[in-house]
Image: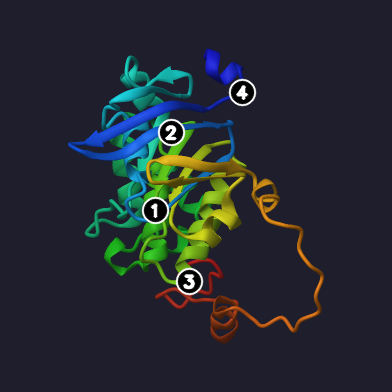
Amino acid sequence: MTAQTIAGLAMRVQGLEKSYGKLEVLRGVDFDVAPGSIFALLGSNGAGKTTTVRILATLLKADAGTASVNGFDVATQPANVRESISLTGQFAAVDEILSGRENLALVARLRHLKDPGAIADDLLRRFSLSEAGARRVSTYSGGMRRRLDIAMSLIGNSPVIFLDEPTAGLDPEARIEVWDAVKELAGHGTTVLLTTQYLDEAEQLADRIAILHQGRIIVNGTLNELKQLFPPAKVEYVEKQPTLEEIFLAVIGGDKSDATGTTTGGQG
């Protein structure tokens, strides 16, 4: 076990800076992430979320500052960092010609793991994709593809996973499916760094939330801590109206069926 993980940190970022010419994308970013937690990096488009993830994943070099992942320095120990992480980008990186099971087994073989078929079957069960495992991914819904993409990232049991805008472009049902998958990850002890521009997503998933704005972290804390930044709530009696998401899910019903006609309740 490394020094940083002994100290109780899966990630530590201090004074991270990155510029592209005169454009300052990151201007001194600092945050820590506890092992087995979901840390949401919240910000609008262009705030620097993806740049931060790319630096932590050793795909990009910072101009200044330090960062460690799983106890390894991203600048001086990039190979160790890469062995510790998985990265899921904004678009599902799956082969649509292959089946879901074949996608998973292929990645397991590329990682030189024993019994790739068993690994694929286990992940299909974990992500509620067993019924669709033999089907071509081209027949999958957006939520199913995203769940498969996240499952592929877990092959090799990486202790840290980066999810960069995992629900971008998905419909409400698919977003909830992905949320369940992310909660499943943390439930198995995986540390998740999630970037998102959706406020409700961070609220639903994150143990801690950091808001990145104009290249800096302007607030960082639990949801309850962030709520303390506002004046105490006034007690008022109002009629609660359902949200559009609640209406949508109520109208379509709780149970959903996949293309095979099998009722899944979780596949979209």
Q: Nearer the viewer, residue 69 or 216?
A: 216
Where on the picture, by quarter, is residue 230? Answer: bottom right
Of residue 243 and residue 159, the one placed in the foreground of this image is 243
Residue flagged by tag 1: what amino acid is it? Answer: Glu
Q: Of marks 1 and 3, which one's residue comes earlier in the chain?
A: 1
Q: Which mark is residue 172?
A: 3
Q: Nearer the viewer, residue 39 or 142?
A: 39
Q: CA distance from mark 2 to mark 3?
A: 32 Å
* Dot placed on the residue nearer the N-terminal end, 2 or 3: 2
Residue 53 vertical placement versus 238 (above, below): above
**263 horizontally vs 239: left or right:** left
Q: Give the label, 1 or 2, closer to the camera.
A: 2
Q: Residue, x 54% and y 37% (percent of image)?
A: 190
Whether the residues at callouts 1 and 3 have beta carbons within 8 Å, the answer is: no
Image point (47%, 47%), residue name: 123
Q: Which residue is mark 1?
A: 165
- Disc sitting over residue 29 in the figure: 2
Residue 121 position, x and y percent, is: 45, 48
